[in-house]
Image (spheres, rainbow, N blue to C red):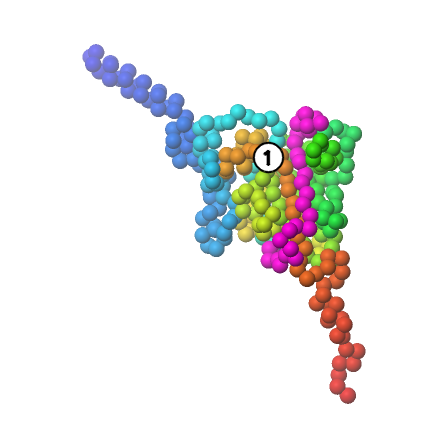
Amino acid sequence: MKTRWLIAVTGMLVWMLNSCSGPSGAASGGAFHSPYGSNSRAESSGGMQGYVPSPSGGGGTSAADAFAAPKKERPGLATTFGRSIKSPMPPTGFDRASSRPAGIDAIFYNDKEGLRAMGVGNYEKTEGFQTVAGDMLEWGIKGNFGFLTSYRSYTSGSGYRRFVEGSHGGTYSIVLKNRCKCDLQVVLSVDGLDVIDGKPASVTKRGYVVPAGETLEVEGYRTGYSSVAAFQFSTVNNSYANLSRGDTRNVGVIGLAVYTPKGQDPWTWMPKEIDKRGKANPFAAAP
């Protein structure tokens, strides 16, 4: 009887230890189930190359490791995956006039408390939609109710910078307006990651093509040819940069690089159009 009692108690202790070991994929070491759905690499096997994987599929520190041993939380905002949005992939084919961008710009973001800590005050408010690259392009950060509150602040050693104020859980988009008479290619980054392939950003990567005189709204990290995951403000630990790569060095900044097309003047009609009009015949029919 005493032996049976000892066996029962031992079994109960083992069950209690196992139940306290954490959820599957965290301390228990089981498979981590991404809160963002299936890994989009499966979609890339059909010819889709370089698109954003789910946070559990990125390089560096895995999402499972991040949850198992969370870093000390940094204050302020970062960007994570939001809801899935239908967004067909616009054309990206583009012949650049130069390997060097015609213009580079950045917009920094944080919550109200974080901006104050960074020395950004209300008296420095500015327009949410501003030009860049010699006035060829206008861009800004749009929230649910128009462009986010924007500031212009002087930073020692860096000159004037643009800032926008976000709020935790809010979504945003990057709005691009081409003011030229030719197409422009725009490379975008959020928190140091390229918005098309989710890898470390570089101006040498491909970008979105914005047709002449048109506006393009980029709503999230691309997850496939027909969808994106909305840009959503989050804590730094829950940011896509941390969950996918374990790297939070560049959270809080949105970057842009603009390229012009080869052989075209941004402010005039395309050479082909000029050539066609120059050869126009007022009497095309033979006598």
For numbered disc 1, what is the local secondary structure? loop
Write down the quadrant of residue 285 in the picture. bottom right
The quarter of the rendered structure image containing the C terminus is: bottom right
Left or right, residue 98 beside residue 57: right
Q: Nearer the viewer, residue 180 or 225?
A: 180
156 or 254: which is nearer to us?
Answer: 156
Q: Residue furthest top?
A: 2
- Dividing the picture into quadrants, the one containing residue 239 is top right
From where the camera sits, is residue 150 visible? no
**What residue range appears in magenta?**
91-119
Q: Residues within 10 Å of mark 1 (few under 14, many from 20)?
A: many
Number of marks in picture: 1
- Regarding residue 26, the answer to whether it shows in the image is yes
Q: Which residue is mark 1?
A: 251
Q: Position of residue 161 (x, y in %)?
A: 71, 36
What residue lies at 68% left-to-right and 25% top-to-bottom? 117
